[in-house]
Amino acid sequence: MNIDNLIKKMEKVFLDLGFQTEYIGEKNEKYMHYNNCYCKISYLMSLSACVIESADCLEDAVRGVLEDGELYFLDSSEAEILSKLRQDLKNYYME
């Protein structure tokens, strides 16, 4: 599975649900922003999984104070990963 393509599709799920792309901090890191929630998708090579890292405010996102969320293992199908992501975003990040 191509990681870059998967991350782009994961970002599209965020956008479809109303998140907006925002670049934050000195490193100009890409975040998906909704209300006071800032999420970043990271790939963990050692686990062969993507993780959603999140902050509850802009200040934490700028400082890189992020909490790890659910893992999305690449041994699942792309459709399963995107479906699970959509449900998790609705349940945990869109209050």
Image (tube, helix red, strand yellow):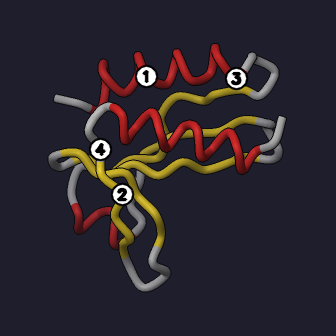
Above or below — where is 39 with respect to 74?
A: below
Given the image, on which type of amino acid does mark 3 rest? Glu
| Residue 90 x/y as whole percent | 30, 22
Query: How far apart are labels 1 and 2 at the CA level?
Result: 17 Å
In primary-sequence order, the first of circles 3 and 2 is: 2
Given the image, on which type of amino acid does mark 1 rest? Arg
Query: Which residue is painted at 23% across and 64% down in the image?
Result: 58
Q: Secondary structure at mark 4?
A: loop
Whether the residues at callouts 4 and 2 have beta carbons within 8 Å, the answer is yes
Front one among 76 and 79:
79
Whether the residues at callouts 3 and 2 have beta carbons within 8 Å, the answer is no
| Residue 23 x/y as whole percent | 38, 70
Query: How far apart are labels 1 and 4 at the CA level?
Result: 12 Å
Q: Residues within 10 Å of mark 3 (few under 14, many from 20)?
A: some
| Residue 34 x/y as whole percent | 23, 45
Left or right of residue 2, residue 40 in this image: left
| Residue 35 x/y as whole percent | 15, 46
What residue is shown with label 2?
A: 21
